[in-house]
Amino acid sequence: MKNLYLFIFFVLFCQNNLNAQSPINVIITGECSDVTGTYIFNGLVNGKNNYTKTFFIDGENVVIGVGFDNTKWVLYANGDLLDDGFSNIAVPVGSAPPFTGWVNTGCADGTMIIEQVLSTSNVVFFDSQMTLYPNPTTSFIIIENSRDINSSLEYSITDIVGRTIIRGKANFKEKIFVENLPKGNYFIEIQSEIGEIVTKKFIKN
């Protein structure tokens, strides 16, 4: 009976740890750059961590994943591990995917790397340093960083259904023009020079 209790405790412990897996940042250039983003842990596939994110592409929702097909890691679409855009034959010890060494297969060109997402405390701290104004706006927004006003940022603006509308680079306190956007609610994902990422919401009037 004692062994049974130990086994149940072990199973529950493993489940809790698996459910606490951190997201990953998938950064892609080239043809498939529109599926760059933060992918969320979504259980195990073939004994390795699986990560997914839903994108709105060509008028429909597409689930893109990073998973293990039993021989290599792949970037895949809609649950089909054979429909891969990038692959990686490196299989590190443990359940997480490799950060580098990705080769484009289904995607015509470009590169792919993976980065760890910052801890929640770091994200909250970075978020507290960011100010977006004016909000609502009619023509431009400004991102201000109270910690380092002279550094630069990369940004992507998405609409409420997840479509990426604008990507670009700017300096903090530099105007980002949005006058051509239709009226509505938008999200801007901001990434600092050292990889900190935070998302802000704004309204275009």
Image: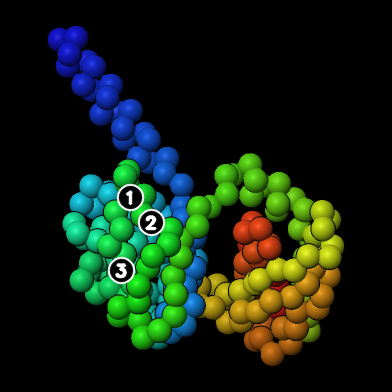
Q: Which mark is residue 98?
A: 2
Q: Is residue 82 above or below residue 192?
A: below
Tell me the SS state at disc 2.
Answer: loop
Q: Nearer the viewer, residue 164 or 73?
A: 73
Q: Quadrant of residue 145?
A: bottom right
Q: Earlier in the sequence, mark 1 or mark 2?
A: 1
Q: Residue at x 35, y 81 (%)?
A: 107
Q: CA distance from mark 1 to mark 3?
A: 14 Å
Q: Is residue 96 above or below residue 30?
A: above
Q: CA distance from mark 3 to mark 2?
A: 10 Å
Give percent across and percent down for residue 24: 46, 55
Q: Residue at x 57, y 75 (%)?
A: 158
Q: Which mark is residue 174?
A: none
Horizontal side of 41 relative to 70 (left or right) equals right
Q: Quadrant of residue 76?
A: bottom left
Give percent across and percent down for residue 80: 22, 69
Q: Residue at x 77, y 53 (%)?
A: 129
Q: Is residue 41 above or below residue 183?
A: above
Q: Quadrant of the N terminus?
A: top left
Please say whether residue 86 is visible from this viewpoint: yes
Q: Nearer the viewer, residue 64 or 84?
A: 84
Give percent across and percent down for residue 200: 67, 63
**Decide: marks 1, 2 in contact (CB < 8 A)?**
yes
Q: Which residue is mark 1?
A: 92
How crowded is the residue under tag 3: few (<14 C-alpha within 10 Å), some, or many (20+)? Answer: many
Amino acid type assigned to the residue bearing label 3 in the image: Ser
Q: Nearer the viewer, residue 103 or 130?
A: 103
Q: Which residue is mark 3?
A: 87
Give percent across and percent down for residue 18: 35, 40
How crowded is the residue under tag 1: few (<14 C-alpha within 10 Å), some, or many (20+)? Answer: few
Amino acid type assigned to the residue bearing label 2 in the image: Pro
